[in-house]
Image (cartoon, rainbow, N blue to C red):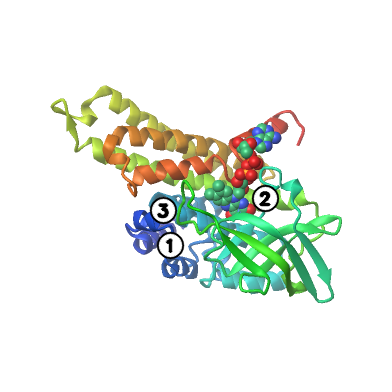
């Protein structure tokens, strides 16, 4: 498997190349590399080969996501959403839905995940989007915000209220009644294709309503977000690897006070802390992926721990990297400047630091 993982990483490096800074500054990724990554199965590599995916384990997929994140945080954010969409279809879809949608997600079409609303950020129980069955169709009405990848997406996986419970429904982005609203330039992951999405009585076939319909909202979103949290955590490993690479290269070539920066003890301390951060983040992700691959119920908590720990280290580690590079690292488009801005967002998305802490405290106290 490692040979296939290495091949996948080589392909990622080839497709993204050194264009992440350019895409970040432009605030947009051209569709062609995204479609290419998707058609190679690289954006949802855990999907089985029989459905056009790569059949990767969580561990191998995680290393692939770290590689994508090391190259480009915006592509990583799109990949996390594509993987989360595929996981949602695998987890909740029936055989027909899996056959229909997974092939599209591994064939170059792109998907986005719509949970958040103006009044429902950390508190998704405040979600107001309505999904109503009407004969052989369902009607979706609501307002979703901050949908990563919406500007690139062919499919939107929309969560909303359904009867006494909740549901997830696959909505073609081209359906009548779907309208994107621009999200003004974000601090980080600037090319993530974020948009707000208006859904005005959007009618789709009932076959697009995923099978978990009617289940409790909390269960549906936690199931979907568990994939997202682990993927974001692996993305943070990628941020730390990018920072470590840039910082070590810089200190081995830049001289001050007659010596390489690498020969100054305080700089060496920064490098040591960066390495330790990358190692710790990798280990918590590996642990969570092992739980995932074993199908252990512990994967839910392990994914929250991984995301919380890795995001914290990515935020402090990227700040350290900017410090080590000095003025060279604050230029717009520079890898560590980008990492610093992207990393801050990792402490907010897929459950902020505070929400992660609340979940972990509940777990430790036996409340969940
Ligand atoms: C770059 C980016 C990409 C995103 N992509 C997506 C996407 O693809 N799909 C999607 O659906 N959403 C997406 N989101 C939305 C994201 O999930 C929310 O921003 C996140 O859940 C936090 O919600 P909020 O921003 O409304 O903050 P709020 O919920 O208003 O929270 C504000 C602050 O209060 C804290 N807080 C809230 N409740 C508590 C509490 N009970 N105790 C202590 N502190 C608390 C939070 O931790 C935070 O620090 C994205 C957001 C960003 C910034």
Label 2 vs 1, first from the N-terminus: 1
Give how far apart the Cα atoms at labels 2 and 1 are: 26 Å
* Ligand 1's quadrant: top right
Q: Nearer the viewer, residue 176 or 153?
A: 176
Give how far apart the Cα atoms at labels 3 and 1 are: 10 Å
Determine the secondary structure under disc 1: loop
Determine the secondary structure under disc 3: loop
Q: How many marks?
A: 3
Q: Position of residue 129 (x, y in %)?
A: 75, 58
Left or right of 137? Residue 193 is left
Give how far apart the Cα atoms at labels 2 and 3 are: 28 Å
Left or right of 53? Residue 113 is right
Decide: few, some or many residues near mark 3? Use Cα within 10 Å; few <14, some 14-19, many ≥20: many
Which dot, 2 or 3, sits closer to the camera?
2
Q: Position of residue 222 (x, y in %)?
A: 69, 48
Q: Residue furthest top?
A: 265
Which dot, 3 or 1, sits closer to the camera?
1
Q: Nearer the viewer, residue 207 or 292?
A: 207
Q: Quadrant of the C terminus?
A: top right
Residue 225 visible in this rendered orientation of the protein: yes
Check disc 2 and report the residue beneath it: 118
Q: What residue sits 59% from the left and 36% below the top?
A: 353
351 w.r.t. 78: above or below: above
Q: Position of residue 299 (x, y in %)?
A: 64, 44
Q: Position of residue 144 (x, y in %)?
A: 66, 57
Tags 3 and 1 touching, CB below 8 Å: yes
Check disc 3 and report the residue beneath it: 72
Name the image quarter holding residue 245: top left
Q: Is mark 2 within 8 Å of ligand 1?
A: no
Check disc 1 and report the residue beneath it: 29
């Amino acid at each position: 498997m490692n040979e296939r993982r290495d091949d996948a990483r080589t392909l990622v490096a080839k497709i993204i190349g050194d264009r992440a800074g350019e895409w970040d500054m432009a605030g947009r990724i051209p569709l062609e590399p995204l479609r290419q990554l998707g058609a190679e199965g690289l954006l949802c590599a855990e999907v089985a080969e029989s459905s056009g995916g790569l059949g990767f384990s969580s561990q191998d997929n995680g290393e692939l996501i770290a590689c994508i994140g090391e190259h480009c945080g915006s592509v990583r954010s799109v990949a996390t959403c594509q993987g989360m969409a595929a996981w949602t279809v695998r987890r909740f879809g029936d055989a027909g839905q899996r056959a229909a949608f997974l092939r599209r997600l591994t064939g170059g079409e792109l998907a986005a995940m719509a949970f958040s609303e103006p009044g429902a950020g950390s508190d998704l129980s405040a979600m107001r989007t309505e999904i109503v069955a009407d004969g052989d169709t369902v009607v979706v009405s609501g307002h979703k915000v901050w949908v990563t990848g919406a500007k690139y997406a062919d499919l939107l996986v929309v969560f909303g209220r359904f009867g006494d419970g909740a549901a997830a429904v696959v909505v073609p982005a081209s359906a009548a009644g779907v309208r994107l609203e621009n999200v003004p330039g974000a601090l980080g992951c600037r090319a993530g294709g974020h948009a707000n999405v208006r859904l005005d009585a959007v009618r789709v076939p009932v076959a697009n309503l995923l099978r978990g319909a009617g289940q409790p909202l909390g269960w549906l979103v936690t199931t979907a977000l568990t994939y997202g949290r682990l993927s974001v955590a692996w993305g943070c490993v990628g941020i730390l690897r990018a920072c470590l690479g840039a910082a070590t290269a810089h200190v081995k070539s830049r001289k001050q006070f007659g010596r390489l920066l690498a020969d100054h003890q305080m700089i060496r301390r920064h490098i040591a802390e960066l390495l330790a951060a990358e190692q710790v983040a990798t280990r918590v992700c590996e642990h969570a992926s092992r739980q995932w691959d074993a199908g252990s119920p512990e994967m839910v908590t392990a994914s929250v721990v991984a995301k919380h720990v890795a995001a914290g280290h990515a935020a402090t580690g990227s700040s350290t990297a900017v410090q080590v590079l000095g003025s060279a690292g604050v230029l717009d488009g520079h890898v560590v400047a980008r990492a610093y801005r992207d990393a801050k967002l990792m402490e907010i998305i897929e459950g902020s630091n505070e929400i992660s802490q609340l979940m972990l405290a509940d777990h430790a106290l036996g409340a969940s």
